[in-house]
């Protein structure tokens, strides 16, 4: 009986929380909890810009021309980030760190006013994924000078994948892994029903859903402008930044949700589509057959627009 019980484990990571619902024996829970936390701690140790001793922070502080051999996990995430940067023509850019700090959304601390034109120009001069010298075969990354990597928009999803893959390797076939709102599910609940997750409706305080999706072998991630922002001069500035302009994205698009086999990919794609915007982002998603849901502001309300792949999954739930 114990082997079919549903349990919930939880903890803290990446400035947020994690939780895992899983079917396992009670006796296995302590080791599973330690293993989950260890994998998330590894992501933080390698890719957190908030940890001064992390691999990414050491790279960001390094001098021009220095060469760094990345840990395998870091390299896997950077490979995915650079691939997405190229495919989105820079709408996604892992070197966005200087802009994140400038707008008050990074380790440098919050700000209550918009940056000056000179400060913005200086930060933009340091941003550009093509500046990076990276050899994927040897995992060697060169610091061109002033480059500041920020993988926050993809590393959280990678953490979900690391945990889910590890649990499956331990023989845990039924689990729902969540880190800061990004999820991946496998198998079923004890009663045989699917892991169903709700896509939050912006402005609803979590009480209403725009869509409900069943997860079994795939992941879901959402990028929205209604959680992290600051107000200045009568305008809201969201934490999602357009690396091409150096400024926060406009307010038309409230959120983008992406379904994908990998949470890392769903996480990064949700950000890229947010930057591309309601029209260009939807066209991009349709061309690539992505399951994506765009929630757009219209007047005083919101309108949801899903790609055919997303609508099909929504009906299946």
Image (spheres, helix red, strand yellow):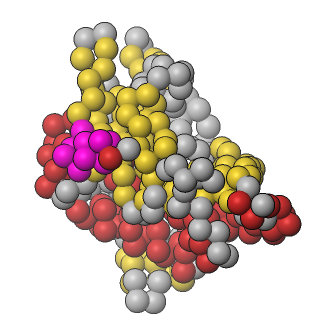
Relative image position of residue 57 (x, y in whole percent): 61, 62
Question: Is residue 307 located in the magenta-colored stretch of the structure?
Answer: yes
Q: Residue at x 67, y 76 (%)?
A: 170
Q: Work out whether residue 195 or residue 1 is closer to the camera in this orientation and state it.
A: 1
**Residue 123: in sight, yes or no?**
no
Q: Residue at x 55, y 29 (%)?
A: 111
**Image location of residue 202, percent across then percent down:** 42, 24
Give the quadrant of residue 287: bottom left
Location of the N terminus by quadrant is bottom right
Q: Viewer-proximal residue, 102 or 272?
A: 272
Is residue 108 shown left or right of residue 230?
Answer: right
Q: Residue at x 49, y 44 (%)?
A: 196
Residue 284 left/right relative to 132: left
Stretch of the chain drawn in magenta? 306-315
Residue 250 vertical placement versus 132 (above, below): above
Q: Is residue 64 magenta?
A: no
């Amino acid at each position: 009986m114990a082997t079919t019980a549903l349990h919930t484990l939880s903890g803290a990571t990446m400035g947020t929380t994690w939780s895992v619902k899983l079917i396992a024996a009670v006796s296995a829970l302590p080791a599973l909890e330690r293993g989950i936390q260890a994998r998330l701690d590894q992501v933080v140790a390698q890719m957190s810009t908030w940890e001064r001793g992390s691999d990414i922070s050491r790279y960001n502080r390094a001098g021009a021309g220095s060469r760094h051999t990345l840990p395998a996990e870091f390299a896997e995430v950077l490979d995915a980030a650079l691939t997405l940067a190229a495919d989105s023509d820079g709408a996604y850019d892992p070197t966005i760190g200087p802009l994140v700090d400038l707008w008050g959304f990074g380790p440098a601390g919050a700000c209550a006013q918009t940056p000056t034109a000179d400060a913005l120009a200086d930060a933009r001069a340091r941003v550009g994924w093509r500046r990076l010298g990276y050899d994927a075969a040897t995992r060697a990354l060169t610091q061109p000078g002033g480059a500041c990597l920020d993988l926050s928009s993809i590393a959280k999803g990678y953490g979900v994948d690391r945990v889910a893959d590890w649990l499956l390797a331990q023989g845990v076939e039924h689990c729902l892994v969540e880190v800061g709102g990004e999820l991946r599910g496998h198998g079923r609940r004890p009663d045989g029903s699917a892991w169903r997750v709700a896509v939050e409706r912006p402005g609803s305080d979590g009480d209403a859903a725009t869509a409900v999706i069943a997860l079994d072998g795939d992941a879901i991630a959402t990028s929205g402008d209604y959680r992290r922002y600051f107000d200045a001069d009568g305008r809201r500035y969201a934490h999602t930044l357009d690396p091409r302009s150096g400024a926060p994205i406009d307010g038309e698009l409230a959120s983008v949700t992406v379904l994908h086999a990998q949470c890392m990919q769903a996480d990064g794609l949700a950000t890229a589509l947010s930057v591309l915007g309601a029209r260009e982002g939807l066209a991009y998603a349709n061309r690539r057959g992505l399951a994506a849901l765009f929630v757009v502001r219209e007047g005083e309300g919101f309108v949801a627009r899903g790609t055919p792949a997303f609508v099909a999954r929504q009906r299946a739930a």
